[in-house]
């Protein structure tokens, strides 16, 4: 039966293999091979919880089992349960401190938690135990380059050693080019990247850094071709557009240079969605802190950017809500209250009213209209959230009040019809 499971597994039929191994385990629950097989196929099926249970059962039989512990740690890592993974790796390293794979796994955990300095130490320990591992060397080099400074210089030395053992490794050669570039050895970096391109490496990293290295080495004319290739691969890169425009401007085509400068400027603009989110987050926090003047300014700005979101005006109206015109504490607050409620009502009537606000808006605006009547004046001052002052005439105010009353009657009529149905 176990052989049938192995056959299924060999054909990548993991579901059938897992079911077969499970039958085997039901017949002999002390057989570790069955548990290993169940855990292995469960992992391939994405049944991580099942795999963890299987390795847990093995460790319950033998808590010192290296393979089960290592595989369990890997599962914890895949699930972002990094603390559990690191605890297991630490225990294994206590027993086997010269295990390169364990040190690398610890480095991966530190990288995932953004502790790059400790990650570099772990990778270096792993690398010192296995200098022939090109993939490990590349991981160490990239970590050192992220740290920058003296670590970037150390990365260059490690590149040379790693390439001694793996002279044809494309990733290591790319990393050497990056190390040379990071250490401002631009001409040498260009030599590495140019050789890679000549051998058929058309990756974006190689093509773009060929152009960037040449540009920084002062080879403006020679940088144009790879920069143009990089631009074709990614038209949104502000840096590529900027350097390509500069190279064209410094050589023979100033007209195209300005085209790419415009593209670079456009690429540098922040996302409209993120800008709007930033406005709303700031407005919300200011409102919670009762900084209504600043909060209303930001909500008003957000509404001007997207006039479909009338809820932004509702938020401002809420901050300046009042029973009537005499409820405001200061003249400035009153002017702000008049503006936002008049503006909110006007915009709401254009875009479809919120029926729940009709009566409130009507009553409040009527109190302002009564003030005009009793004082014998024809207009009232208003203050917008952006600080602009204006005057509201009695006729304009009365027109909005009448429109609100009509909408309110229509809303009541619709409600009565719905109730009758």
Image: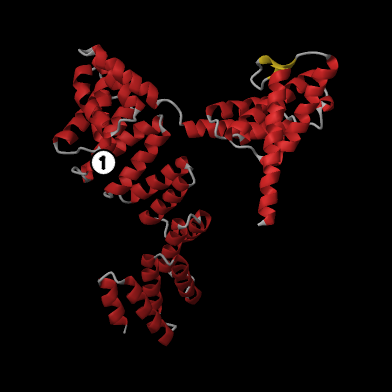
- Position of the N terminus, as image quadrant, is bottom left
Q: Residue at x 16, y 33 (%)?
A: 195
Q: Is residue 389 above or below residue 157?
A: above
The one nearer the camera, 358 or 274, is: 358
User: Where's residue 352, x and y in %?
Assistant: 60, 37
Instruction: Give the total of numbered labels.
Output: 1
* Residue at the farthest bottom position: 27
User: Where's residue 26, x and y in %?
Assistant: 43, 84
User: Where's residue 77, x and y in %?
Assistant: 45, 56
Task: Report which quarter residue 228 is drawn in.
Answer: top left
Q: Residue at x 34, y 51 (%)?
A: 129
Secondary structure beneath label 1: helix
Residue 131 visible: no
Task: Report which quarter residue 10 is drawn in.
Answer: bottom left
Q: Residue at x 71, y 29 (%)?
A: 402
User: How is the protein colored in the picture?
Assistant: secondary structure
- Position of the C terminus, as image quadrant, is bottom right
The one nearer the camera, 63 or 325, is: 325
Residue 233 visible: yes
Q: Is residue 282 above or below residue 130?
A: above
Q: Is 333 displayed left or right of 223 in the figure? A: right
Q: Is 134 displayed left or right of 372 in the figure? A: left
Q: Residue at x 31, y 43 (%)?
A: 138
User: Where's residue 338, x and y in %?
Assistant: 73, 24
- Near mark 1 (Cα within 10 A), the count class, few <14, some 14-19 or many ≥20, is many
The one nearer the camera, 60 or 23, is: 23
Q: Is 37 displayed left or right of 173 in the figure? A: right
Task: Report which quarter residue 156 is drawn in.
Answer: top left
Label 1, on which residue?
172
């Amino acid at each position: 039966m176990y052989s049938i499971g192995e056959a299924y597994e060999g054909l990548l039929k993991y579901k059938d293999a897992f079911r077969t191994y499970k039958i085997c385990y039901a017949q002999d629950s002390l057989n570790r091979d069955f548990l290993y097989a169940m855990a292995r196929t469960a992992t391939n099926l994405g049944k991580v919880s099942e795999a963890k249970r299987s390795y847990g059962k093995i460790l319950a039989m033998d808590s010192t089992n290296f393979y089960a512990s290592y595989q369990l740690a890997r599962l914890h890592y895949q699930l972002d349960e990094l603390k559990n993974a690191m605890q297991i790796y630490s225990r294994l390293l206590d027993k086997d401190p010269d295990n390169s794979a364990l040190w690398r796994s610890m480095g991966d955990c530190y990288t995932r938690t953004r502790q790059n300095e400790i990650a570099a130490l772990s990778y270096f320990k792993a690398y010192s135990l296995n200098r022939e591992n090109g993939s490990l060397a590349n991981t160490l080099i990239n970590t050192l380059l992220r740290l920058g400074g003296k670590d970037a210089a150390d990365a260059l030395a490690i590149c040379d050693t790693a390439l001694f053992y793996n002279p044809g490794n494309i990733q290591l050669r790319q990393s050497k080019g990056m190390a040379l570039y990071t250490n401002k050895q631009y001409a040498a970096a260009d030599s590495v990247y140019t050789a890679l391109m000549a051998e058929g490496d058309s990756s974006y990293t190689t093509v773009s850094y060929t152009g960037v290295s040449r540009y920084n080495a002062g080879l403006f004319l020679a940088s144009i071709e790879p920069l143009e290739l990089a631009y074709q691969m990614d038209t949104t890169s502000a840096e590529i557009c900027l350097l390509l425009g500069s190279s064209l401007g410094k050589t023979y085509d100033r007209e195209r240079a300005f085209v790419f400068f415009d593209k670079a400027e456009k690429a540098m603009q922040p996302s409209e969605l993120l800008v709007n989110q930033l406005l709303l987050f700031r407005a919300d926090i200011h409102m919670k802190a009762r900084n209504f003047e600043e909060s209303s300014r930001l909500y008003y700005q957000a509404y001007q950017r997207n006039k479909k979101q009338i809820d932004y005006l509702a938020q401002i109206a809420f901050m300046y809500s009042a029973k009537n015109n005499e409820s405001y504490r200061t003249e400035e607050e009153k002017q702000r209250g008049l503006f936002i409620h008049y503006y909110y009502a006007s915009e709401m009537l254009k875009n479809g009213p919120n029926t729940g606000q009709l009566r409130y808006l009507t009553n409040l605006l009527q109190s302002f209209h009564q003030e005009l009547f009793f004082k014998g004046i024809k207009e009232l001052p208003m203050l917008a959230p952006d600080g602009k002052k204006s005057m509201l005439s009695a006729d304009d105010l009365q027109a909005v009040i009448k429109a609100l009353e009509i909408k309110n009657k229509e809303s009541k009529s619709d409600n009565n019809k719905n109730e009758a149905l």
